[in-house]
């Protein structure tokens, strides 16, 4: 991505899994909040027409005057859609149900899968510098998810500790490989985070063992447990880390952010 301002460009990550209910939005909100809490400037892009990330951050639908729909379909400048959240250093590009029609409205655009990449080019000249852009993808491998993958440097995959976990993951990895070949050669998997983990359940333990044996260091050491506070927090329009920062789920996401940053620092050190 171009950088005309001299600012260090933001790292852009998709949070994706075509399966629903695996903790994508919970991960996007709480990882973003945890990174913001340690001083990183984070932009969370809600690319799901359900708008759960927007609601989970307390942004009422009536206050979403500009959304991802405007940016992708009408090509509204990206800075006009960015809003502040109640979390210091965490910004949001909200979503709305209108986004569900993007596939149809962009069907005649031959470069429709590159709309988001083009919009994100503006981040290099935006007045605020972001360290990270987290894209909360919808639970399907549709045009919106392809836009996210085409615009990202890497993908974080929330993976529920359940029987069919690896089967769904293999489909996503195939899609990432195809996107790398045709749209975005630099795309890679940033990491896989096990979610909804129950250490008392033999199945969860078996899934963890299988995933680590098959994917090794791609899998974060941190696992996110099943935790009622993670489920309750969105109904109060708050990240779980603010709703109850001492809960097991909140602590897990704080540890995940720390592990993410350690990997980042190690990568930078190895590159210099």
Image: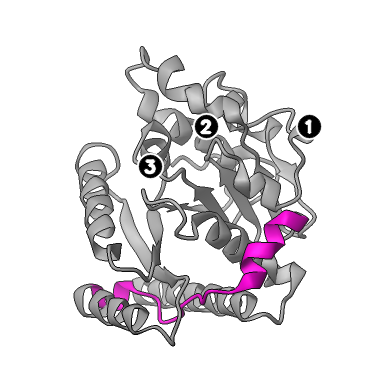
Q: Quadrant of the N terminus?
A: top left
Q: Which badge, 3 or 1, comes first in the chain's sequence?
A: 1
Q: Which badge, 2 or 1, comes first in the chain's sequence?
A: 1
| Label 2: element kind | helix
Residue 268, compared with residue 141, is above or below; it is below
Q: Quadrant of the C terminus?
A: bottom left
Foreground: 226 or 237? 226
Q: Which residue is painted at 26% across and 42% down in the image? A: 179
Residue 26, compared with residue 161, is above or below; it is above
Dot 3 corresponds to which residue?
140
Cα distance between the residues tagged 2 and 1 = 24 Å
Quarter of the image holding residue 70?
Answer: top right
* Image location (x, y in percent) of residue 271: 35, 71
Q: Which residue is painted at 30% across and 50% down in the image? A: 186
- Is residue 184 toward the left or the right of residue 61 in the image? left
Residue range in magenta is: 215-236
Cα distance between the residues tagged 3 and 1 = 26 Å
Cα distance between the residues tagged 3 and 2 = 22 Å
Residue 126's label in the rendered image is none
At label 2, counting other C-alpha atoms closer than 10 Å, the crowd grade (few under 14, some 14-19, many 20 or more) is: some
* Image location (x, y in percent) of residue 52: 61, 46
Dot 1 corresponds to which residue?
62
Residue 102, compared with residue 250, is above or below; it is above
* Image location (x, y in percent) of residue 147: 40, 36
Q: Is residue 9 visible?
A: no
């Amino acid at each position: 991505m171009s950088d005309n301002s001299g600012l260090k460009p933001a790292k852009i990550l998709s949070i994706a899994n075509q399966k629903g209910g695996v903790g994508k939005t919970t991960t996007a909100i709480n990882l973003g909040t945890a990174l913001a809490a340690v001083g990183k400037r984070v932009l969370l892009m809600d690319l799901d027409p359900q708008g759960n990330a927007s609601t989970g951050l307390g942004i009422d639908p009536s206050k979403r005057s500009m959304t991802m729909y405007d940016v992708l379909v009408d090509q509204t400048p990206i800075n006009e859609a960015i809003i502040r959240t109640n979390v210091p250093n965490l910004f949001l590009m909200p979503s709305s149900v209108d986004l569900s029609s993007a596939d149809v409205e962009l069907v005649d655009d031959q470069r429709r899968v590159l709309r988001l990449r083009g919009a994100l080019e503006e981040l290099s000249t935006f007045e605020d510098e972001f360290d990270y852009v987290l894209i909360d993808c919808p639970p399907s491998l549709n045009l919106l998810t392809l836009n996210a993958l085409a615009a990202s440097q890497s993908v974080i995959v929330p993976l529920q500790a359940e029987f069919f976990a690896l089967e769904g993951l293999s489909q996503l990895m195939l899609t990432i490989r195809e996107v790398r070949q045709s749209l975005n050669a630099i795309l890679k998997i940033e990491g896989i985070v096990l979610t909804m983990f129950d250490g008392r359940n033999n199945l969860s333990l078996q899934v963890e063992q299988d995933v680590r044996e098959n994917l090794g260091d791609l899998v974060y050491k941190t696992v996110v447990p099943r935790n009622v506070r993670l489920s309750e927090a969105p109904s109060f329009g708050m990240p779980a880390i603010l709703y109850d920062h001492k809960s097991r789920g909140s602590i897990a996401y704080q540890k995940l952010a720390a592990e993410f940053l350690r990997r980042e620092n190690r990568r930078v050190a190895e590159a210099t």
